[in-house]
Image (cartoon, helix red, strand yellow):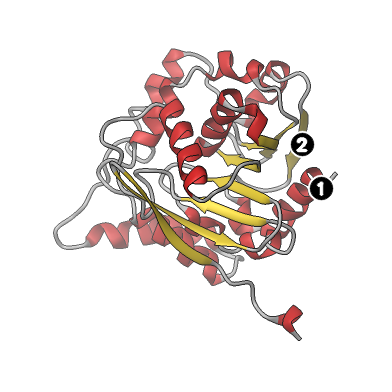
């Protein structure tokens, strides 16, 4: 009878000297840590976590400055985010773990694997950020949709604008998907974009070759920003396995079954 009970997702906070880090957690067994993209949080994985929880204790922290975690004291680097991740896991008494990074979270996961490979059993980088050159990094900083503080109107019309912009993208998906996505978009704060800035400053081309743990490089074929660099990224991590899935960069929300099945196949092999 208990097999049919829904998976409980618990929430909590870890206290640090500069503030609190919020997390969601579910399941039991070997620890699997998920890190998310900028402007998102652990909320974006709530359709995925129940699919992984029967096999792992799934922990999803909100990156400092995102979701319900407090802002870091200053603009952080990717290495500082990675250090904070280890500190949070140490506070939760987690030693070894599997690590899956998504977009900005993939950069953080990459750096974590370089900093302390002995603690990471296997690594998955989904949509690892890569840039053609400095001009491409500069160009992204000029796009308000991706970079900078959100525009907030006194009359609240920014809610309607975002609703109308986003709603057509979710036709054919469960209403829950749109509701989660909309909440994530509207939770963007004045400093949330610092996660993007950290990625733009990150020298991933010099860090990826230093990865020594078993690694899966994974992309969604609908990821027009980073899939052009698949072959280049794969060359930087020559011992890694690569996989391209049919879907979008947020397929863990849109198609969590395929995303979970791919993770389980790799992590449990």
Q: Residue 188: give x, y in percent of width and height.
A: 33, 50
| Residue at image location 71% in from the left, 28% down from the top | 213
Residue of label 2: 243
- What is the secondary structure assignment of the residue under circle 1? loop
- Give 167 or 49, whichever is nearer the viewer: 49
- Give 45 or 90, whichever is nearer the viewer: 90
Q: Residue 181: give x, y in percent of width and height.
A: 47, 58
The residue most toward the left is 154
| Residue at image location 60% in from the left, 38% down from the top | 223
* Left or right: 189 as drawn, with respect to 91: left
- Give 142 or 36, whichever is nearer the viewer: 36
Q: Which mark is residue 268?
A: 1
| Residue at image location 43% in from the left, 37% down from the top | 84
Going from N to C along the chain, the mark reached first, 2 or 1, is 2
Characterize the local packing of mark 2: few (<14), some (14-19) or many (20 or more) Cα atoms within 10 angstroms: some
157, above or below 140, in the image: below
């Amino acid at each position: 009878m208990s097999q049919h009970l829904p998976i409980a997702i618990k929430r909590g906070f870890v206290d640090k000297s500069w503030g609190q880090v919020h997390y969601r957690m579910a399941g039991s067994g070997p620890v699997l840590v998920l890190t998310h993209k900028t402007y998102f949080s652990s909320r974006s994985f709530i359709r995925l976590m129940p699919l992984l929880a029967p096999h792992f204790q799934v922990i999803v922290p909100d990156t400092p400055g995102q979701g319900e975690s407090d802002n870091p004291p200053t603009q952080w680097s990717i290495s500082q985010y990675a250090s904070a991740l280890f500190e949070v896991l140490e506070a939760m008494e987690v030693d070894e773990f599997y690590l899956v990074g998504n977009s900005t979270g993939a950069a953080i996961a990459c750096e974590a694997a370089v900093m302390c490979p002995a603690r990471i059993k296997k690594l998955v980088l989904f949509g690892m950020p890569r840039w053609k050159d400095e001009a491409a990094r500069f160009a992204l900083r000029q796009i308000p949709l991706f970079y900078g503080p959100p525009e907030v109107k006194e009359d609240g019309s920014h809610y309607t604008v975002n609703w109308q912009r986003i709603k057509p993208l979710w036709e054919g998906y469960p209403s829950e998907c749109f509701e989660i996505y909309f909440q994530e978009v509207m939770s963007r704060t004045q400093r949330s974009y610092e996660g993007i800035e950290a990625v733009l400053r990150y020298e991933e081309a010099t860090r990826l070759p230093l990865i020594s743990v078993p690694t899966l490089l994974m992309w969604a074929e609908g990821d027009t920003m980073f899939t052009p660099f698949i072959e280049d990224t794969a060359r930087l991590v020559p011992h890694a396995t690569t996989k391209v899935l049919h879907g979008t960069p947020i397929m863990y929300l849109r198609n969590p079954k395929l995303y979970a099945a791919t993770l389980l196949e790799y992590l449990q092999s």
